[in-house]
Image: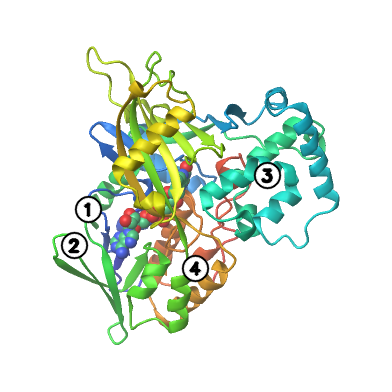
Amino acid sequence: MKQGTSVVIIGGGPAGLSAALTLAEEKVPVSVLEADPIYLGGIARTVRHGEYLTDIGGHRFFSKSREIEDFWSRVLGDDLLERPRSSRILFRGKLFSYPLRAIEVLRKIGYGESLLCIASYIKSHFLPVKPAKTFEDWVVNRFGKRLFQLFFKTYTEKVWGISCDRISADWAAQRINSLSLGVAILNALSPWRNGSKKVKTLLESFRYPRKGPGMMWEVCAEKIVKAGGTVALDSPVDQLTWDSPTSQWTVEGTNTDGVKFKHRASHVISTMPLSALITALRPPASELALAAARSLRYRDFITISVIVEDGGKGAGDGIFQENWLYIHDPSVKVGRIQNYKSWSPEMVPAPTSGQSPRTFLGVEYFCFKGDGLWQSSDQELIALAKKELLTTGILKKPEQFIEGFVNRQEKAYPVYDECYQDHVRTIRDEIASRYPGLHVSGRNGMHKYNNQDHAMMTGILAAKNIIAGENLWDVWRVNQDAEYLEHRSQTGGLIDPPVKT
Ligand SMILES: Cc1cc2nc3c(=O)[nH]c(=O)nc-3n(C[C@H](O)[C@H](O)[C@H](O)COP(=O)(O)OP(=O)(O)OC[C@H]3O[C@@H](n4cnc5c(N)ncnc54)[C@H](O)[C@@H]3O)c2cc1C
């Protein structure tokens, strides 16, 4: 490591905190600046509503990297629970097992529809769309038009808010796990596929902190501080200035009380959204890079966390026992519903004496900041969640609904539209050529559809590059294939393969 090395990390999410722990343990002076005044963990935080705990999205801890799995074990030890994975699909008012079972599918979608799906699959197999540019082309080629229209179109458009013919085929290829429904249906409908094309096994379990994902990141921050680093909440960074003569960065911002802060360091690891980073740089980025940054788009996310009377024996069993349900039904806006009690019993307090058993649901909506859903008041959103829980039959009667809370998550998903790769490339080149000592990591930090483990790996590798004093690892090559989250994989780490840059 070069003498005088010090690091400021922007963002106290999984990427930033993993990088910080790696640096602090090597005795590198490191400060983490987190914008949120209350929570660490970023999208993987746990939000407290009294004793009820919300996970923004439901975070499974699973990685095919031994390094990442060991990192989690080292931070939380026995506080990481092993949880069974279970989910179902609500479609046309019926619940389907996930993965689908042949007899159940045939019974629920009907033999006629099943045959049409197979015929359409065969047609696409022999007459594929060439070249497959969009998500729609990719799915139709792989699964047939009929299955695409039945199972993929509505849910995917709910998630992304754009028509499937405007989503890049890349995204489909990377997020194959979202397509497992089609694999499962085809598998269910055409048993002969099991012979030559073996369908991979679904993950049956994952790990989960007993008090939600934020517990991982709060304990990680304690370890950073113990190792000599600092972690500051309420520190939104709005300017980063590179001073060439001193080879130092100055990182500045203003907290919610209007107090200004300023940190100096030889290196910065940024996990703030790439689009915001570019506008915060001094000397200013080129007009080309600024325009690229303005063109990056995001999908936002609202969770309405709802305390309900469970109506069963108390384990969430009166509602549903799965971790979550996918809501493919086009008649409602909700995309998924979590049952936090099924993730960990400690997400819900024990009932007080005389109180009927309760559970805590996360009613999830995908939206764009500024659209009708996002602009709705909390009361309107809570009323919508209540209505849709009743419409979908998850609540049997309105009296089961006790109280709701709204959590808005901006920039939950970096959007992969037709041009995002060009924009990211422009920004990458600008950073590499004009801003020494600036490293980008994480999900929005790289505008990559990274889960926690990939986000963490990019942070850890950025830290290792700083420790090494040269860029030994190309963080952009941490692969973003999210397939492993649904399927057990026998191969590989997270980077393919590590290269000297
Ligand atoms: C609905 C949903 C479900 C998911 N499920 C899973 C799952 O099951 N398993 C899994 O592994 N992953 C899952 N993920 C992905 C996971 O949440 C992300 O991979 C992870 O949180 C990314 O970490 P990060 O540190 O890169 O970014 P973030 O979590 O976004 O953290 C970035 C941090 O930077 C802070 N920040 C931003 N701007 C500034 C600024 N200007 N100054 C200071 N701080 C700033 C933010 O407040 C935030 O805390 C899910 C994501 C979503 C949206």
Read off the residue under disc 2.
Answer: 255
Element class at badge 1: loop
Q: Earlier in the sequence, mark 4 or mark 1?
A: 1
Give yes or no for contact between labels 1 and 2 (Cβ–Cβ under 8 Å). yes
State if disc 3 and disc 1 touch (CB < 8 Å): no
Residue 195: give x, y in percent of width and height. Answer: 81, 34
- Does residue 442 appear to the left or right of 45 in the view shown? right
Question: Under tag 2, what secondary structure?
Answer: loop
Q: Nearer the viewer, mark 1 or mark 3?
A: 3
Kindly report the distance in space between the C-alpha atoms of the residues bearing marks 1 and 2. 9 Å
Residue under label 3: 149
Judging by the rendered image, the residue that carries numbered circle 4 is 472
**Which of labels 3 and 4 is toward the front?**
3
Return the disc, 1 or 3, that comes first in the chain's sequence: 1
Q: Residues within 10 Å of mark 3 (few under 14, many from 20)?
A: some
Residue under pointer 1: 37
Crowding near the residue tagged with mark 2, few <14, some 14–19, many ≥20 C-alpha atoms within 10 Å: some
Residue type indicated by callout 2: Asn
* Among the two numbered marks 1 and 2 on one chain, the one whose residue lies closer to the N terminus: 1
**Identity, as a three-letter code, of the amino acid under mark 3:** Gln
Whole-number angstrom distance, CA of label 4 to CA of label 1: 35 Å
**Quarter of the image that includes the N terminus:** bottom left
Q: Is residue 224 above or below residue 210?
A: below
